[in-house]
């Protein structure tokens, strides 16, 4: 059914209305659209916040309080933006794990998957710089700790830190450039997300069975329009509960204390969505090794299409991989828990074991399991044929 009648808009109609979609997509495929919704909420609320925010170390904390107390519905905009970042990461993490489970990185969607990893990196950079802007204690010290990690790079590390800071400490220049980049990067994410969707439509969506998605298709409207709408309603209810009733649950109380370079918080931690990677960073005794491991824990996702050796996409037909996948999910939660704890015994040792399994899953289990599955399939098939011949 064609909804857009103008011939000039036919490509748009084919792209978002009559777009042929696999008929067996489950609700796990809603999270891609929910991620776009979160991005829209973040950009819209961010623009309104920027109208009242002052990127100066003497005024930033006060301007945030001004937004909360004096701007009409400023509290709603600020809480929607702060909690919206958490919602964005929740949705994207579920989207990534769904892709891992159903093999969405496999051919011919390699470039689509890599663009998704780039979007994740841009999200992390945007979220980190946004966390600095309220200029609370955790904002200031989090920025100090994370930017100092660049000093581990041989020869040029110290120069990179000074360039990031815009001086010799986290100061006004740092806040200004972080504010500028935090405002700019979401639009870069929009561009990458658009490319992500174009590539998705090029080869079609993956599906729970992992079969060729060029057959057995239905129009996106009205079937998946209704399905996505149902997912949006449930998500907005979940989002609203946090904004209206628990707006500070996912934040850190120290960020309601104005930044003070002379007072170090007892325990410096990033936002919850960075905790698994923070745990990996701290699990390596060497500073440079920790930085490399933290970056590798994200970049390894981009190499999945080339590491994978399985000819079967969906884990529904890979019982061994399904067990390892759920171990990875549990391992990720353990890393998040470890990242929020003090780096001492036994948390340090647990974090190291969890880090080893995380990398083993991608670098050992994924490539070896695909070859093992092919061997077992060949062995079982040969055995079945032999038994049939002997029987007759």
Image (cartoon, helix red, strand yellow):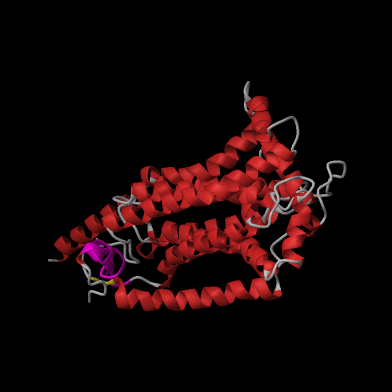
For the point 69% across and 54% down, which residue is it? 53
Towards the viewer: 392 or 45: 45
In this rendering, the answer to whether 41 lies above or below 219 is above
Q: Quadrant of the C terminus?
A: bottom left
For the point 79% across and 60% down, which residue is it? 253
Q: What is the x, y in percent for residue 361?
A: 49, 49
The boundaries of the magenta stretch are 8-24
Horizontally, is 391 left or right of 208 in the view? left
Towards the viewer: 2 or 219: 2
Residue 228 quadrant:
bottom left
Can residue 261 be seen in this snapshot?
yes
Q: What is the x, y in percent for residue 267?
A: 80, 49
Q: What is the x, y in percent for residue 298?
A: 52, 45
Q: What is the x, y in percent for residue 94?
A: 50, 62
Horizontally, is 127 left or right of 193 in the view? right
- The answer to whether residue 282 is magenta is no
Can residue 353 be seen in this snapshot?
no
For the point 24% across and 58% down, which residue is it? 381
Residue 73 quadrant:
bottom right
Residue that lies at the very extreme toward the top in this rendered image: 155
Report how many numbered discs are placed on residues in the image: 0
In this rendering, the answer to whether 332 lies above or below 10 is above
In this rendering, the answer to whether 158 lies above or below 16 is above
Q: In which quarter of the image is the N terminus?
A: bottom left
In this rendering, the answer to whether 265 lies above or below 246 is above
Towards the viewer: 157 or 183: 183
For the point 25% across and 70% down, which residue is it? 18
Towards the viewer: 197 or 215: 197
């Amino acid at each position: 059914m064609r909804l857009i009648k103008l011939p000039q808009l036919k490509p748009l109609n084919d792209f978002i209305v009559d777009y042929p979609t696999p008929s067996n997509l489950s609700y796990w495929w809603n999270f891609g659209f929910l991620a776009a919704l979160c991005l829209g909420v973040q950009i819209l609320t961010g623009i309104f916040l920027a109208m009242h925010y002052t990127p100066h170390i003497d005024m930033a904390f006060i301007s945030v309080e001004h937004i909360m107390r004096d701007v009409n519905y400023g509290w709603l905009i600020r809480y929607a933006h702060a909690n919206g970042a958490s919602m964005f990461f929740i949705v994207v993490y579920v989207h990534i794990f769904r892709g891992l489970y159903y093999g969405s990185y496999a051919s011919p969607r390699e470039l689509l998957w890599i663009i998704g990893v780039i979007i994740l990196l841009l999200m992390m950079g945007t979220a980190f710089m946004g966390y600095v802007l309220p200029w609370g204690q955790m904002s200031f010290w989090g920025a100090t700790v994370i930017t100092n990690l660049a000093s581990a790079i041989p020869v040029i590390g110290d120069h990179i830190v000074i360039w990031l800071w815009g001086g010799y400490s986290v100061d006004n220049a740092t806040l200004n450039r972080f504010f500028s980049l935090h405002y700019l990067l979401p639009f870069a994410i929009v561009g990458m997300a658009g490319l992500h969707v174009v590539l998705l439509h090029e080869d079609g969506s993956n599906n729970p069975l992992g079969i060729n998605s060029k057959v057995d298709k239905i129009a996106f409207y009205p079937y998946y329009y209704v399905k996505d709408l149902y997912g949006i309603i449930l998500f907005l209810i979940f989002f609203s509960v946090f904004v209206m009733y628990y707006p500070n649950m996912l934040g850190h109380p120290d960020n309601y204390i104005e930044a003070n370079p002379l007072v170090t918080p007892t325990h410096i931690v990033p936002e919850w969505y960075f905790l698994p990677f923070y745990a990996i960073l701290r699990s390596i005794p060497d500073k440079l090794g920790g930085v490399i491991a933290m970056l590798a824990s994200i970049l390894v996702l981009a190499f999945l299409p080339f590491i994978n050796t399985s000819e079967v996409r969906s884990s529904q037909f890979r019982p061994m991989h399904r067990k390892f996948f759920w171990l990875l999910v549990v391992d990720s939660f353990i890393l998040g828990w470890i990242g929020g704890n003090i780096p001492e015994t036994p948390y340090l040792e647990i974090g190291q074991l969890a880090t080893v399994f995380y990398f083993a899953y991608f670098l050992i289990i994924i490539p070896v399991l695909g070859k093992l599955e092919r061997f077992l399939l060949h062995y079982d098939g040969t055995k079945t044929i032999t038994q049939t011949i002997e029987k007759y």
